[in-house]
Image (cartoon, grey):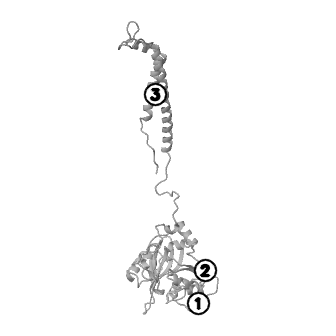
Amino acid sequence: MERKLRIPGNFSESLQSMNKRCISWMHMRCFCPEVYLTREAETLGDGGELLGGEGQGTSDPMKYTHLYGFVWIIGASFVLFLYFYASRFHQHAVSRATVALPSSNTDYGVSVPLEELMKGPLAQNDSRILDYIWKRNFIRAPSKLPYNLSNAKLDPSMGQSIIVKHALNEMRNGFFVECGALDGETRSNTLMLERDYGWQGLLIEGDPKNFERLITKNRKAWSSDACLATKRFPHQVIFKQHFNMGKISSKMTIQDGAEIPWGFAKVQCFPLFSLLSALNISVVDYLSLDVEGNELDVLRTVPFDAILIKVLSVEYVHDKGGREAVKKFMTSKGFRIFGEVRDPRNLANDFIFVNNRIS
């Protein structure tokens, strides 16, 4: 936005006019005194005496003329000084008026703590978000240690990994994202793909207690202790900790510095796209989404035109919209139902979707 300092347009012209009149008067008064002597003589008597009251005596006209001239020279000099000073000020003002000043959304160098920025709103792939994710260790590298599993050969999923493997023609060396990864082993939909088919991936678990258990399993995937944002920018939430039933608490807000009740934790959330951008991932072969009722909110944050997700499993039993709402949304994004996993104990109630862009 360009801001201009306005100076009255007639200011300089008025000074110039005054200056010309003063110089003209000075010239006639000092250098052409006969003009003014004629006018002053009209006030003198025949003997050269000034007409007026008694006791005024006589006076030499040239004396007054020179005195007046001296006074007016000083006055004119002062006016000239004002004129040149004002002219310089006016030129400076004009030069400033043509300079484009910063717009209202320009960073003026005010330092804002990154923690405040992470409360939103920022674009999902804003570089400050990506830097913050790495600097605050929200993504950890895959373990180089041997697996530490309760059952090294078991497929702990409820059947999702078998369907995904079939949908992708037993693909090897793919990339997965498991949201709601729990402890990294219990009912994991991705462990078999990682262990037996050489897949890499990202495990996301927002419950701090579950995440502590997860990292002890030495998974060969990236891991994040953030929760998935339900908005299109980072935000913080209160997370209810309850092993496989842990979830974002929609009813509780805690002011900064306030004590957090037992069984709850304040957790930083990032959009899925932010975490993938931090890893420079644009193709996800399999996305497993089980976030206890926030599935649709998370899916609405995903820019499907910027990320290719080939196969997707979504738990629908806890979502507010139910299975039909999940089906309708994914269909609108170009996916078709490939399979469904149900368990009578409610341990799994998932749709398996396949992207129409893949054969």
Tag 3 or tag 1, which sits nearer the N-term?
Answer: 3
Name the residue tied to disc 2. Answer: 142
Residue type (three-letter) at the residue carrying disc 3: Asn
Tag 3 or tag 2, which sits nearer the N-term?
Answer: 3
Viewer can see residue 3 = yes
Considering the numbered disc 3 on the image, is that residue within a helix, a strand or a loop? Answer: helix
Q: Position of residue 132 (x, y in %)?
A: 55, 70
Name the residue tied to disc 1. Answer: 149
Considering the numbered disc 1 on the image, is that residue within a helix, a strand or a loop? Answer: loop
Identify the residue at the far top of this view: 47
Tag 1 or tag 2, which sits nearer the N-term?
Answer: 2
Name the residue tied to disc 3. Answer: 19
Q: Residues within 10 Å of mark 2 (few under 14, many from 20)?
A: some
Determine whether label 1 and label 3 are within 8 Å by CB.
no
Q: Residues within 10 Å of mark 3 (few under 14, many from 20)?
A: some
Q: Is residue 199 above or below residue 35?
A: below
Please report the residue visible at 42 percent of the width from the left and 32 percent of the height from the top.
14
Q: Position of residue 96 (x, y in %)?
A: 50, 44
Determine the CA span between mark 1 and mark 3: 97 Å
Please report the residue visible at 46 percent of the width from the left and 48 percent of the height from the top.
3
Residue type (three-letter) at the residue carrying disc 2: Pro
